[in-house]
Protein backbone atom coordinates (compact mmCIF):
# COMPACT_ATOMS: atom_id res chain seq x y z
CA UNK A 1 0.00 0.00 0.00
CA UNK A 2 1.25 3.50 -0.89
CA UNK A 3 1.55 5.84 2.09
CA UNK A 4 0.80 9.45 1.26
CA UNK A 5 0.89 12.75 3.06
CA UNK A 6 -2.64 14.17 2.66
CA UNK A 7 -1.30 17.71 2.17
CA UNK A 8 1.12 16.84 -0.63
CA UNK A 9 -0.06 15.84 -4.10
CA UNK A 10 1.50 12.80 -5.73
CA UNK A 11 4.00 13.44 -8.50
CA UNK A 12 4.96 11.18 -11.34
CA UNK A 13 8.58 10.07 -11.52
CA UNK A 14 9.19 12.05 -14.69
CA UNK A 15 7.88 15.28 -13.18
CA UNK A 16 9.95 14.76 -10.02
CA UNK A 17 13.08 14.12 -12.11
CA UNK A 18 12.47 17.27 -14.15
CA UNK A 19 12.05 19.34 -11.00
CA UNK A 20 15.25 17.90 -9.55
CA UNK A 21 17.20 18.79 -12.70
CA UNK A 22 16.20 22.45 -12.66
CA UNK A 23 19.07 24.77 -11.79
CA UNK A 24 18.90 25.95 -8.18
CA UNK A 25 18.86 29.71 -7.94
CA UNK A 26 20.42 31.40 -4.93
CA UNK A 27 17.97 33.06 -2.52
CA UNK A 28 16.61 36.42 -3.63
CA UNK A 29 18.69 39.30 -2.28
CA UNK A 30 16.19 42.07 -1.58
CA UNK A 31 17.38 45.58 -0.78
CA UNK A 32 14.46 47.38 0.86
CA UNK A 33 14.76 51.14 1.35
CA UNK A 34 12.27 52.46 3.90
CA UNK A 35 11.29 51.52 7.44
CA UNK A 36 7.79 52.98 7.43
CA UNK A 37 4.53 51.09 7.90
CA UNK A 38 4.70 49.28 4.54
CA UNK A 39 8.38 48.42 5.07
CA UNK A 40 7.56 46.90 8.47
CA UNK A 41 4.67 44.88 7.04
CA UNK A 42 6.82 43.67 4.14
CA UNK A 43 9.72 42.63 6.37
CA UNK A 44 7.31 40.68 8.59
CA UNK A 45 6.14 38.79 5.51
CA UNK A 46 9.56 38.33 3.86
CA UNK A 47 10.98 37.08 7.16
CA UNK A 48 9.10 33.84 6.55
CA UNK A 49 10.13 33.41 2.92
CA UNK A 50 13.28 32.12 1.17
CA UNK A 51 15.18 35.37 0.68
CA UNK A 52 17.79 37.64 2.23
CA UNK A 53 16.64 41.18 3.04
CA UNK A 54 18.84 44.24 3.52
CA UNK A 55 16.52 46.73 5.22
CA UNK A 56 17.83 50.27 4.84
CA UNK A 57 16.73 53.57 6.37
CA UNK A 58 18.37 56.71 7.71
CA UNK A 59 16.21 56.63 10.84
CA UNK A 60 17.61 54.02 13.21
CA UNK A 61 14.79 54.54 15.71
CA UNK A 62 12.23 53.13 13.25
CA UNK A 63 13.73 49.66 13.18
CA UNK A 64 12.28 47.11 15.61
CA UNK A 65 14.51 45.62 18.31
CA UNK A 66 14.16 42.17 16.77
CA UNK A 67 13.98 41.20 13.11
CA UNK A 68 13.73 37.81 11.37
CA UNK A 69 16.99 35.89 10.93
CA UNK A 70 17.09 36.56 7.17
CA UNK A 71 16.87 40.36 7.63
CA UNK A 72 19.90 42.63 8.01
CA UNK A 73 19.22 46.16 9.28
CA UNK A 74 21.27 48.99 7.76
CA UNK A 75 20.82 52.35 9.51
CA UNK A 76 22.86 54.74 7.39
CA UNK A 77 23.04 58.39 6.38
CA UNK A 78 24.17 57.32 2.91
CA UNK A 79 21.60 54.82 1.65
CA UNK A 80 22.66 55.48 -1.95
CA UNK A 81 25.99 53.76 -1.21
CA UNK A 82 24.09 50.55 -0.41
CA UNK A 83 22.94 50.47 -4.06
CA UNK A 84 26.53 50.33 -5.28
CA UNK A 85 27.45 47.44 -2.99
CA UNK A 86 24.40 45.26 -3.61
CA UNK A 87 25.14 42.01 -5.44
CA UNK A 88 24.32 41.48 -9.09
CA UNK A 89 20.79 40.15 -9.44
CA UNK A 90 19.50 42.15 -6.46
CA UNK A 91 15.83 43.05 -6.09
CA UNK A 92 15.57 46.75 -5.18
CA UNK A 93 12.48 48.13 -3.43
CA UNK A 94 12.22 51.87 -2.77
CA UNK A 95 9.59 53.05 -0.30
CA UNK A 96 11.14 55.84 1.74
CA UNK A 97 9.46 58.78 3.45
CA UNK A 98 11.12 61.27 1.11
CA UNK A 99 10.48 61.81 -2.63
CA UNK A 100 13.91 63.43 -3.10
CA UNK A 101 15.59 60.37 -1.59
CA UNK A 102 13.36 58.09 -3.69
CA UNK A 103 14.58 59.87 -6.81
CA UNK A 104 18.22 59.80 -5.73
CA UNK A 105 17.95 56.05 -5.14
CA UNK A 106 16.10 55.53 -8.43
CA UNK A 107 18.81 57.37 -10.37
CA UNK A 108 21.52 55.36 -8.61
CA UNK A 109 19.77 52.03 -9.23
CA UNK A 110 19.18 52.84 -12.90
CA UNK A 111 22.93 53.36 -13.37
CA UNK A 112 23.26 49.64 -12.79
CA UNK A 113 22.39 47.11 -15.46
CA UNK A 114 22.58 43.97 -13.38
CA UNK A 115 19.56 44.06 -11.06
CA UNK A 116 16.75 41.51 -11.26
CA UNK A 117 14.02 43.93 -10.21
CA UNK A 118 13.55 47.58 -9.29
CA UNK A 119 10.24 48.62 -7.80
CA UNK A 120 9.18 51.87 -6.18
CA UNK A 121 6.07 52.63 -4.19
CA UNK A 122 4.05 55.44 -5.71
CA UNK A 123 1.40 56.51 -8.15
CA UNK A 124 1.40 56.63 -11.93
CA UNK A 125 1.89 60.40 -11.59
CA UNK A 126 5.06 59.85 -9.54
CA UNK A 127 6.28 57.45 -12.20
CA UNK A 128 5.76 59.99 -15.00
CA UNK A 129 7.63 62.69 -13.04
CA UNK A 130 10.50 60.35 -12.23
CA UNK A 131 10.72 59.11 -15.83
CA UNK A 132 11.08 62.68 -17.09
CA UNK A 133 13.80 63.43 -14.53
CA UNK A 134 15.64 60.16 -15.21
CA UNK A 135 15.69 60.92 -18.94
CA UNK A 136 17.11 64.38 -18.12
CA UNK A 137 19.85 62.58 -16.18
CA UNK A 138 20.77 60.41 -19.15
CA UNK A 139 18.75 57.24 -18.57
CA UNK A 140 17.69 55.87 -21.94
CA UNK A 141 14.00 55.77 -22.76
CA UNK A 142 14.24 52.04 -23.48
CA UNK A 143 15.42 51.37 -19.91
CA UNK A 144 12.47 53.01 -18.15
CA UNK A 145 10.52 49.77 -18.39
CA UNK A 146 13.03 48.31 -15.91
CA UNK A 147 11.47 50.48 -13.19
CA UNK A 148 8.22 49.18 -11.71
CA UNK A 149 6.03 51.93 -10.25
CA UNK A 150 3.40 51.51 -8.90
CA UNK A 151 4.42 48.19 -7.34
CA UNK A 152 2.48 45.06 -6.42
CA UNK A 153 0.50 42.49 -8.36
CA UNK A 154 -2.62 43.95 -9.98
CA UNK A 155 -6.00 43.46 -8.41
CA UNK A 156 -5.16 44.19 -4.77
CA UNK A 157 -6.64 47.64 -4.23
CA UNK A 158 -6.61 47.83 -0.43
CA UNK A 159 -4.12 50.48 0.72
CA UNK A 160 -3.51 49.06 4.21
CA UNK A 161 0.24 48.35 4.73
CA UNK A 162 -0.23 44.56 5.13
CA UNK A 163 -2.24 44.41 1.89
CA UNK A 164 0.41 46.40 0.02
CA UNK A 165 3.08 44.10 1.49
CA UNK A 166 1.25 41.02 0.22
CA UNK A 167 0.91 42.54 -3.27
CA UNK A 168 4.60 43.49 -3.36
CA UNK A 169 5.84 40.12 -2.05
CA UNK A 170 3.65 38.37 -4.63
CA UNK A 171 5.17 40.51 -7.39
CA UNK A 172 8.72 39.70 -6.22
CA UNK A 173 8.02 35.98 -6.23
CA UNK A 174 6.31 36.23 -9.62
CA UNK A 175 9.45 37.86 -11.05
CA UNK A 176 11.58 35.23 -9.33
CA UNK A 177 9.46 32.40 -10.77
CA UNK A 178 9.83 33.88 -14.26
CA UNK A 179 13.59 34.17 -13.71
CA UNK A 180 13.73 30.51 -12.64
CA UNK A 181 11.72 29.46 -15.71
CA UNK A 182 14.14 31.29 -18.01
CA UNK A 183 17.12 29.68 -16.25
CA UNK A 184 15.48 26.27 -16.66
CA UNK A 185 14.82 26.84 -20.38
CA UNK A 186 18.42 27.97 -20.90
CA UNK A 187 19.78 24.91 -19.08
CA UNK A 188 17.47 22.60 -21.06
CA UNK A 189 18.58 24.19 -24.34
CA UNK A 190 22.26 23.77 -23.45
CA UNK A 191 21.97 20.06 -22.59
CA UNK A 192 23.11 17.66 -25.30
CA UNK A 193 20.41 15.72 -27.11
CA UNK A 194 20.26 12.10 -25.97
CA UNK A 195 19.41 9.35 -28.45
Image (cartoon, rainbow, N blue to C red):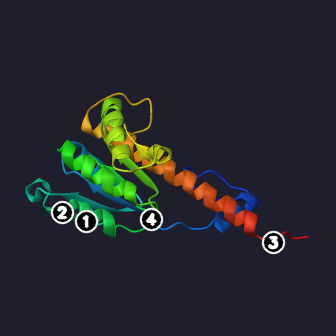
Side of 110 where 184 appears, left or right:
right
In what quadrant of the picture does the N terminus appear? Answer: bottom right
Q: Residue furthest left?
A: 61
Please report whichever mark, 2 or 3, sits nearer to the chain's N-terminal start.
Answer: 2
What residue is rendered at 26% in x and 33% in y? 160
Labelled disc at residue 81: 1
Residue annotated with mark 3: 192
Labelled disc at residue 27: 4
Give the mark toward the camera: 4 or 3.
3
Q: CA distance from mark 2 to mark 1?
A: 6 Å
**In contact (CB < 8 Å): disc 2 and disc 1:** yes
What residue is rendered at 28% in x and 53% in y? 105
Helix, strand or loop at label 1? It is: helix
Q: CA distance from mark 4 to mark 3?
A: 28 Å
Q: CA distance from mark 3 to mark 1?
A: 43 Å
Give the mark toward the camera: 4 or 1.
1
Please report whichever mark, 2 or 4, sits nearer to the chain's N-terminal start.
Answer: 4
What residue is rendered at 46% in x and 60% in y? 113
Res. 158 in view:
yes
What residue is rendered at 76% in x and 60% in y? 14
Residue toward you, 137 or 23: 137
Side of 121 where 27 appears, left or right:
right
Amino acid sequence: MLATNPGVPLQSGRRRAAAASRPALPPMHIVLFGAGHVGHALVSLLGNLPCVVQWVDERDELFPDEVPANVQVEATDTPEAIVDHAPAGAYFLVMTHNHALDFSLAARIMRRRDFAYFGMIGSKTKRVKFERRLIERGVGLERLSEMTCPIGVPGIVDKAPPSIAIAVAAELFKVRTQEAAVAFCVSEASEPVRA
